[in-house]
Amino acid sequence: MHRVVALALPEIVAFDLSIPAQVFGHRDEAGRYVFAVCAERPGLVPTTTGFAIHVDRSLRALAAADTVIVPGFAPTTDPGPAVAGALRRAAERGARIASVCVGAFALAAAGLLDGRRATTHWEHADELAARFPAVRVNPDVLYIDEGRILTSAGVAAGIDLCLHMVRTDHGADAAGDVARRMVAAMHRTGGQAQFMRRPIPRAGPSLAPTCEWAIGEMHRPITVADLAAHAHFSPRTLARRFVDETGLTPMRWLTLQRLDEVRRLLEATDLPVEEIAQRCGLGTAGNLRLHLARDAGTTPTAYRRAFRVAA
């Protein structure tokens, strides 16, 4: 059983804590994860939203955690030597350490982000960079996976990060099950922008029918012109609306849908890589390997070996 422990710092952001609780602590995950919450001083821990939570475990719980998650807290002051030391010891013995939103300030105070890429809520990114110049802060992404150290952007981006960890641990099907239960997006890549710089246009039809059509037709080549024709837009308008509504260009979005299907077929079938490439519209096995290596840092064989489920 994979032990996940969330560290509740005063004043914890309750929503940030509820995300890992719902992902890892839900009864549906009882066969995969054990979830707990700890604090420096067990007892009532105040939140930023006018109520307190009762925590009965101390920092000693971090010593047995496989994954440690630090939700956001306010103000983002140094949490102190006891917390920093516990986080460092957990990292030194190989635990996966993750932060949600401004929880990154605790990781930075412990020195765990020095020399690493990291993100946080875009409103606090400049402060993180100024206080911790050794951290390579990127305010324009949803989450960053640096191997054993992971950080997410603000609030709901914590859902994307936790689903990413489930996907890493148990594959795309398991993450999809959790996303459906939470009524959340199946997969938003970590490199997606934190927020849309232009408002989503209110006039005109939604892109959802065109997205559904493209997924159903992904076995064949699809161009921006094809998408535009289906949506009854010009290619330029289609491209602009796609970025407004998804944060991605049309072809980047389509590539991610193809790769999601690649993962599903690698996990759930014995189909050869060449056939999977054709079914997903990637053409050749070589092209599939190239895209999977860029997106997931692995090969089809290694992915299938890690996440194989019954066909």
Image (cartoon, grey):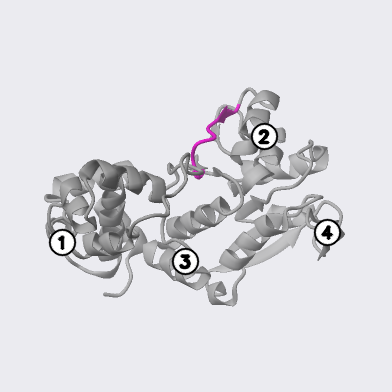
Q: Is residue 4 left or right of residue 45?
A: left
Q: Is 136 contained in the magenta span?
A: yes
Magenta region, residue range: 135-143
Q: Is disc 4 placed on a helix, strand or loop?
A: loop
**Residue that numbered label 1 is attached to:** 279
Residue sitting at 80 percent across and 56 percent down? 47
Residue 116 located left or right of residue 265: right
Report the amino acid beneath label 3: Ala
Q: Which residue is mark 3?
A: 179
Q: Dot 2 lies on which element?
A: helix
Q: Nearer the viewer, mark 3 or mark 2?
A: 3
Element under disc 1: helix
Outermost residue, bottom direction?
27
Q: Mark 2 vs mark 4: give the one in front.
A: 4
Pointers 3 and 4 in contact (C-beta within 8 Å): no
The residue under the point 78% across, 50% down is: 9
Measured from the top left, where is residue 68 in percent x and y? 64, 52
Disc 4 from disc 1: Cα separation: 52 Å
Q: Earlier in the sequence, mark 1 or mark 3?
A: 3
Mark 2 and mark 1 in contact? Answer it, CB < 8 Å: no
Which is more N-terminal, label 1 or label 4?
Answer: 4
Which quarter of the rendered picture does the N terminus lie within? bottom right
The residue labelled by disc 2 is 108
Disc 3 crowd, CA 10 A, few/some/many (<14, 14-19, 20+): some
